[in-house]
């Protein structure tokens, strides 16, 4: 039986408006999860655009900081570079400087990937962290309330890069992925874990992303080359938040800047 996916996309005029939309989307998702289950568990990605979102969340002069139920939030990372937490390229450091140092969260609410360790050791430890935190048994996968993703110009997402071993992993929750393109190791959630989340969204901006966005969401299926095509949430809905430049080659939106695509697998 074919699996259907509804791709809901919202297009904003520029990067600033896109970041505001994403910030409100995160706050609304966290509040909804906290009200329904008493807490919200979300996994976030790194990058320059998420940095702006995190800064908005942590800014006392913006409305979202006061709206967020920080005491009910548990924060996880989608992926991490194999560097220490104070390294300039650390996703954790970026998030801490942009948001965590500015908000009322306790250390035990933050579950970082230990990029300073041997990659395989770090992946195994993070998988154990997930199993313990979510109280998983056997082959169970964690179910995040929200997973926030970005997309590279090569079609990668998380640290699932084209033609790398991690895109073939079905059994593990977290893997160490060697990325020849970067001559580096990365830690990443596997795509089956991402797809189990209650809500998954991509935040994508920039004209350099327009062609890959069209190829990933409108082109033929080729996840070996375009790993972002592996993101097919079990709930059947995927959200995209884009600026006009990144969405330039998608079908036109309605008057409110929204559109819907449908795919079958």
Image (cartoon, grey):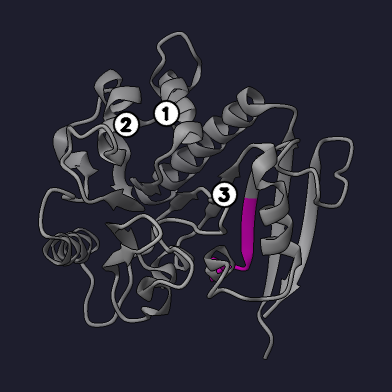
Disc 3 and disc 1: Cα gap in Å? 15 Å
Instruction: Residue 193: name its quadrant.
Output: bottom left
Residue 264 appears at what percent x and percent y?
72, 77
User: The residue tagged with tag 1: helix, strand or loop?
Assistant: helix
| Residue at mark 2 | 94
Residue at point 78%, 61% (across, down): 261
What secondary structure predominates along the stretch shown in magenta? loop
Q: How far apart are marks 2 and 3 (CA)?
A: 19 Å
Q: Name the residue under label 3.
A: 202
Which secondary structure lies at badge 3? strand
Check contact, mark 3 vs mark 1: CB within 8 A.
no
* Mark earlier in primary sequence (3, 1): 1
Is residue 138 placed above or below 251 in the rendered structure?
A: below
Q: Which of 242 and 207 is in front in this view?
A: 207
Q: Is residue 136 left or right of residue 26?
A: left
Provide residue 50's location: percent of width, then percent of height: 47, 35
Query: Is the residue marked by circle 1 packed among few (<14), some (14-19), or many (20+) residues within 10 Å?
Result: many
| Identity of the residue drawn at 51% across and 33% down | 49
Location of mark 1 (residue): 54
**Discs 1, 2 touching: Cβ within 8 Å:** yes
Q: What stretch is highlighted in magenta?
A: 231-239
* Image quarter of residue 140: bottom left
Q: Which residue lies furthest to the top in this view?
A: 61
Q: Where is residue 46 in the image (x, y as percent from the top left)?
A: 39, 41
Total marks placed: 3
Q: Quadrant of the N terminus?
A: bottom right
Query: 42 or 227: which is nearer to us?
Result: 227
Q: Is residue 215 above or below residue 49?
A: below
């Amino acid at each position: 039986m074919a699996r259907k996916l509804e791709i809901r996309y919202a297009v904003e005029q520029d990067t600033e408006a896109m970041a505001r939309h994403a910030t409100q989307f995160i706050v609304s998702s966290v509040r909804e999860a906290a009200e329904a289950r008493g807490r919200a568990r979300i996994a976030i990605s790194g990058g320059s655009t998420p940095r702006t979102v995190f800064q908005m969340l942590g800014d006392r002069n913006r409305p979202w900081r006061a709206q967020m139920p920080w005491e009910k939030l548990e924060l996880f990372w989608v992926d991490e570079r194999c560097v220490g937490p104070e390294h300039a390229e650390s996703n954790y450091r970026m998030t801490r400087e942009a948001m965590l140092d500015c908000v009322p969260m306790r250390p035990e609410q933050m579950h970082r990937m230990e990029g300073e360790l041997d990659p395989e050791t770090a992946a195994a430890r993070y998988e154990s962290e997930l199993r313990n935190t979510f109280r998983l048994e056997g082959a169970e996968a964690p179910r995040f309330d929200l997973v926030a993703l970005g997309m590279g110009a090569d079609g990668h997402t998380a640290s699932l890069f084209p033609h790398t071993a991690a895109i073939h992993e079905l059994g593990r929750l977290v893997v160490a992925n060697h990325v020849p393109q970067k001559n580096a190791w990365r830690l990443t959630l596997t795509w089956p874990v991402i797809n189990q989340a209650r809500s998954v969204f991509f935040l994508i901006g920039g004209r350099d992303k327009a062609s890959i966005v069209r190829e990933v969401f409108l082109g033929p299926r080729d996840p070996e080359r375009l790993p972002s095509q592996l993101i097919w949430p079990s709930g059947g809905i995927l959200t995209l938040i884009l600026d006009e430049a990144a969405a330039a080659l998608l079908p036109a939106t309605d008057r409110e800047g929204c559109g819907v695509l449908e795919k079958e697998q």
